[in-house]
Amino acid sequence: MKKVNVALVGLSFGLEFVAIYCKHPQVNKVYIVDTNEKLLELACTRYSIPKEQCLTDYNKALSIEEIDAIHLVTPPATHAPFSIKALNAGKHCGCTIPMGMSLDELHDVINARKASGKNYMFMETTIFQREFLYIQELYKKGDLGRLQYMSCAHYQDMEGWPEYWEGFPPLMHPTHAVGPCLMLTGKLPKQVFAKGSGRVRKELEEKYNCPFAFESAFITLEDSDVTIEMERFLYGVARSYSECFRIYGENKSFEWQQLEKEAPVLYTRTGALEKVDIITDENEQSNRGSEILEKRINIPDYGHLLPDEISSFTTNTVYNNENTHLSFKQGGGHGGSHPHLVHEFICSILENRKPAIDDIMGAYWTGTGICAHESAMKGGITVDIPLFK
C-alpha cells in the first residue's frame, strides 16, 4: 500500500487533525510545524511524534524532500503565500479557508498549482459534514425534485479571537455558508450583489475599512435559474453561532434548526391539496394549497464511508468539554467533517486525481465572498465573478 508523508502546519486548531493523520492507514510519517514551542511539545508528546519531525520553521519543512504534502491551518493572511510556497517546493497542498485575501491571490495560487503539477485541496469542512452528506444523498436520489431556492448563513461573534480577525469584513470569509449550496448545484457562481447593514465599533472598522456589522448577498449561477441568498456577521449581533443552509426543492425542502439542541426540519409536498373549511351558508369544504408534511429528522453519521482506523473521529475528537478550542466549540464539531477532509486529501494524492474541492472551486467559492463584499462597499452594485481556470 502506498503511503504519504504529511506536514501539518499550525497547531492551534490544527491539533484537531494531527491525531487523524497519525491513524490514517495511508499516512506514513506526520511532521508538525508551529512557532509556538509549547504547542509543538504537547503534540509531540501526546502523539509520540519523533523530535526530528517537530519543526518551528515552515521553510525547513518545505526543504525536507520526503514530505509529500502540506496541510495549512494558519492565519488567513498566510493562506495564499504559504500555499504558493508549498506548491513551488513541489509539495501537494491542502489549505484551510479562505483560499486568499484578494482575487489576485486566488489567481496566484491557481498559477502555482498549474506550474507545480501537484494537488491543491481547499479544506472546506461544510461539504463533508453530516447535514450536507444527508441532503446530497436525497438530492442525488431525486427526492428533493427540482431545486427552487437556497439560502445559507454563517453567524459568528468573534469578540476575543486573535487580533487579525478584528473588523474582518463578514463576506470576505464566506465559504462555511455558501460552500454547501454551490457544491449541491454543481454550478459556478456568475454574479453577486450585496448590501451591508448596521455598524461595528470604530476601532473594528479601521483595520479593514469595513463599517458593516452584517453583509447579505444574492448570487446568480451559470446555466441555472436558482438563486442563492447568503449572509454573515462577525461582530455586534445578538445571535449564537451557526453554519447553516436551507434547501428548497419542488418535492422536499430542508431547513436548519434555529437552536443547536433542536433537530432540522424536512418538509414534504405530497401532491395532494389540503381541505380547508370555507365559511358559506352550507359550510362547504374546498381544496386549496398543497399538502405539506413536516417532521424533525435525525441526521445519520457517515463514519462508515471512512477507513475503520479513522471512522471514530466523526464523533470522538481532540477537542471536547475539557479541552476546548473556540473554532471547534462554536462550530459544533464541524459536523464530523475532519476525517472526511483528511481522507479525501490523502486519496486524491495517491489516486493521482483532483480533490473534491480543488483550487478552481476554492477560488470561485472564496471569490464569491470577495466580490460580494466589494458590492456591499459600493452600495449594492452587481459584480461579475471572474473566471478561474
Image: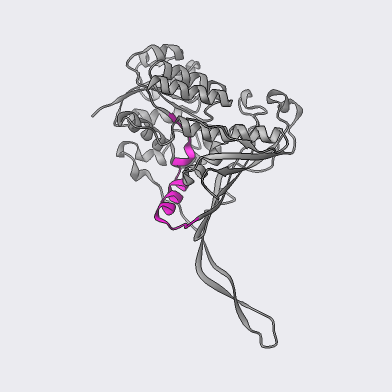
Image quadrant where residue 170 sits = top right
Q: Is residue 257 left or right of residue 378?
A: left
Per the image, is 126 magenta? yes
Task: Please report the residue visible at 61 percent of the width from the left and 38 percent of the height from the top.
Answer: 156
Indicate how the structure is coloured in the image: one colour
Task: Please report the residue visible at 52 percent of the width from the left and 34 percent of the height from the top.
Answer: 364
In x, y percent, where is residue 353?
34, 32
Split into 4 quadrants, where in the image is the N terminus?
top left
Task: Please report the residue visible at 46 percent of the width from the left and 51 percent of the height from the top.
Answer: 135
Residue 8 in view here = no
Task: Please report the residue visible at 28 percent of the width from the left and 26 percent of the height from the top.
Answer: 3
Furthest residue in direction front, as rendered: 223
In x, y percent, where is residue 331?
53, 39
Q: Which residues are magenta?
A: 121-146
In x, y percent, where is residue 244?
55, 45
Q: Nearer the viewer, residue 363 or 276?
A: 363
Residue 253 in view here = yes
Q: Nearer the viewer, residue 119 or 43?
A: 119
Magenta segment's dominant SS is helix
Furthest residue in direction bottom, as rendered: 282
Q: Nearer the viewer, residue 383 or 344?
A: 383
Q: Nearer the viewer, residue 271 or 241?
A: 271
Q: Is residue 261 left or right of residue 44?
A: right
- Vertical comparison of 343 with 91: above or below: below
Per the image, is 168 magenta? no
